[in-house]
Image: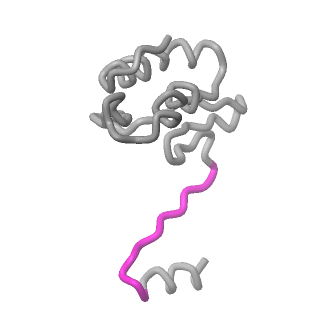
Amino acid sequence: MRKLTKLFEEVDLTITVDSNLFATDFLDLSYDLQNDTLFPFRKPNNNTLYINKSSNRPPNIIRQLSVMINISCNENEFNRAKPYYENALANSGIKFK
């Protein structure tokens, strides 16, 4: 750990290590280690944006966007998160349930 801390300090970065956690957030997922479950994670006041349906992206990408968004969690967590992602898609001009 000391070597890693020293390496970070050499490039003006800091590192934090937490131990004995029962849950952790990584990228856009929260992972409950005790129950072995995943659910979506968003920082407070962070709005999800997707490419707009009218953008000049390849049509295949736009058609597949709603399929590419995968919320990997149990049914309860899925149902809690679903409206947020449906709303973000609708704001991009994509109607998907």
Query: Looking at the image, which is closer to me, 95 or 4?
Result: 95
Query: Looking at the image, which is closer to me, 31 or 1?
Result: 31
Q: Predominant secondary structure in magenta?
A: loop
Position in image of residue 86 (x %, y %): 42, 17
Position in image of residue 12 (x %, y %): 36, 81
Position in image of residue 51 (x %, y %): 36, 36
Left or right: 30, with 62 as reference point: right
Residue depicted at 41% across the width and 14% down the height: 95
Query: Looking at the image, which is closer to me, 69 or 61?
Result: 61
Which image quadrant for residue 52?
Answer: top left
Left or right: 93, with 1 as reference point: left
Left or right: 11, with 47 as reference point: right
Residue depicted at 57% across the width and 26% down the height: 67
Residue depicted at 40% across the width and 41% down the height: 57
Residue situated furthest left in the rendering: 45
The stretch in magenta equals 10-20
Residue depicted at 64% across the width and 25% down the height: 73
Which image quadrant for residue 90?
Answer: top left
Q: In the rendered view, would you say 4 is above or below 73? A: below
Quadrant for the N terminus, please: bottom right
Q: In the rendered view, would you say 18 is above or below 24? A: below
Q: Say how the picture is coloured.
A: one colour
Left or right: 72, with 6 as reference point: right
